Amino acid sequence: MSSRRDFILNSTKWALGVATVPYVQGLIKNKRKDMKIGVQVYSVRDLINDNFAEAMKQIADIGYDYIEAYGLGSDGKFLGSMTPLQYQQIIHDLGMEIKSTHTGYFTAEEANKYLSVAKEMKLQQLVIPYLSEELRGDYYTVAENLNAIGEKFREEGIRFGYHNHAFEFELTENGEIPLQILIENTDPGNVSFQMDIYWVKKAGFIPTGLFEKYPGRFTSYHIKDADKNLDQTTVGTGIIDFPKIFSKNTISGADLFFVEDERTNDPVTNLRNAYNYLMKIDF
């Protein structure tokens, strides 16, 4: 049984290169020129209520290459009313791509309707971003369900993943780390993980240490920064060492990178400042 303390200590050791890590074949080169940047649309959630197309245009005008959608319902529509093709047309007309979407938790028995949307939109991945409190009582059952869903997605060539917050690092009643349960009880070919870098930092863990411990499992990131008080701040103005993180893309397996800024004050400016920072860093 792994304790939170052991998990943190091991994460630190891997981050320092104490452990030997196998080379992961077939992953992207960790060079800046190969790294295109996207946005999680939740960042402009207040703006899309007024004019979705205009909000997306502001993202495109900044220079972002692609987006990650959210709000895919069980009825196959986005944000309550938009069909996948309507959504896709707006994004494509602006010269961007839809690489991924978030959707609510669902069972393996319900997977086909979500898979149908992912296929229709030619998504690279679909991600479950949250677990309700009632689901957190049995992470082993959740892992089993995620694995079964992921098997169906893999058969169609679409990646299926799970996105962390901070609660996945809080010890269960049995003294286990939930994220560790989810990773170690799912097949790497079936389930990938979308690392929210901010929430990993907030939980007291080291992103690069987790990459080293689970090479190839973190195939996309949410790029968010933290200030010295561990509150969210504009990417590039906080304490997170993004060049160091991006230098490990070959190990993590990441090939999709989504800026997300959950603050509602002037989101377009926040996204623009984040983009400008990411365009000038080297690693």
Image (cartoon, rainbow, N blue to C red):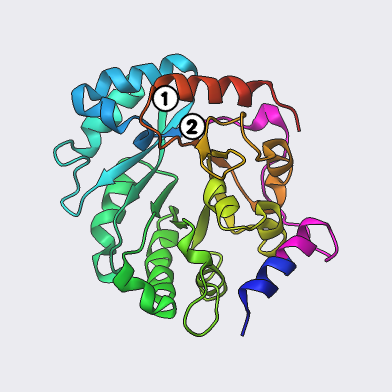
Label 2 or label 1, whichever comes before in sequence order: 2
- Res 38 label: 2
Contact (Cβ within 8 Å) of mark 2 with mark 1: yes
Task: Residue 148: give x, y in percent of width and height.
Answer: 39, 72
Task: Residue 69: give x, y in percent of width and height.
Answer: 34, 39
Which tag is nearer the camera, tag 2 or tag 1? Answer: 2
Q: Residue at x 72, y 59 (%)?
A: 212
Q: Residues within 10 Å of mark 2 (few under 14, many from 20)?
A: many
**As shown in the figure, which amino acid type bears the numbered disc 2?**
Gly
Q: Which residues are magenta?
A: 11-38
User: SS for tag 1?
Assistant: loop
In magenta segment, residue 240:
no
Q: Residue at x 19, y 54 (%)?
A: 74
Question: Relative to 262, is 206 above or below?
Answer: below
In magenta segment, residue 32:
yes
| Snapshot quadrant of residue 44 | top left
Which quadrant would the C terminus be assigned to in this image? top right
Task: Residue 24: give x, y in percent of width and height.
Answer: 72, 56
- Res 96 label: 1
Q: Is residue 190 visible?
A: no
**As shown in the figure, which amino acid type bears the numbered disc 1?**
Met
From the image, give the main secondary structure of the stretch colored magenta. loop
Question: Relative to 251, is 108 above or below?
Answer: below
- Res 240 label: none
